[in-house]
């Protein structure tokens, strides 16, 4: 058993960005907070399936070049190698939960 508290873990970008709560051995999962105007950055995974659940806010979600308007309560499941990006085009923060399976920390490929 492993227990963490979100407030004990740092965001990658200081007060926003990616925050991993669990890393391995079989899955990655955590939280993403995006301030207005922030982008996740286009990428894909060779083997990893990634799921996003928008807890609060709204933003644009891009999958294989198609734009989707996302609102709180929306979930997206992406299979490898679907290209994806998220852009908070709103005037309020957006907060996601993400899950990546299997745990392959070097599987991400940056792509526009």
Image (cartoon, rainbow, N blue to C red):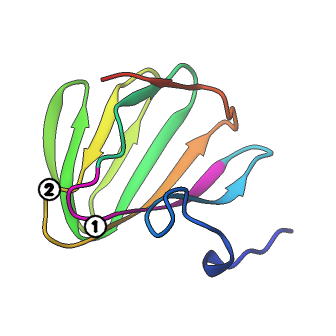
Q: Quadrant of the C terminus?
A: top left
Instruction: State the predominant SS element of the stretch in magenta.
Output: strand
Image point (13%, 37%), residue name: 67
Mark 1 or mark 2, which is nearer the start of the sequence?
A: 1
Q: Which of the 4 quarters of the picture holds residue 20?
A: bottom right
Image position, residue 15 (x, y; %): 46, 70
| Residue at position x 66%, y 70% in the image | 9
Query: Would residue 110 be found to the left or right of residue 57 on screen?
Result: right
Which residue is at the front of the view, 110 or 73? 110
Mark 2–mark 1 distance (CA, rounded to whole Å)? 17 Å
Give the number of the mark in front: 2 or 1. 2
**Where 29 falls versus 40 (above or below)?**
below
Residue 34 is covered by the magenta coloring: yes
Q: Position of residue 93 (x, y in %)?
A: 27, 70
Q: Which mark is residue 89?
A: 2
Span shown in magenta: 28-38
Which residue is label 1 attached to? 73
Image quadrant assignment for residue 107: top right
Of residues 75 and 4, the one drawn nearer to the viewer in this rendering:
4
Where is 16 relative to 47, above or below?
A: below
Circle count: 2
Question: Which x, y percent locates residue 8?
Answer: 68, 77
């Amino acid at each position: 058993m492993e227990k963490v508290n979100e407030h004990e873990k740092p965001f990658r970008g200081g007060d926003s960005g990616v925050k991993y709560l669990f890393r391995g051995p079989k899955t990655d999962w955590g939280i993403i907070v995006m301030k207005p105007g922030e982008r996740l950055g286009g990428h894909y995974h060779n083997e990893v399936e990634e799921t996003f659940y928008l807890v609060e806010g709204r933003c644009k979600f891009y999958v294989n070049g198609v734009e989707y308007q996302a609102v709180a309560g929306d979930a997206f499941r992406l299979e490898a190698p679907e290209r994806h990006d998220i852009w908070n085009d709103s005037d309020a923060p957006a907060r996601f939960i993400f899950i990546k399976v299997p745990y392959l920390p070097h599987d991400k490929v940056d792509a526009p």
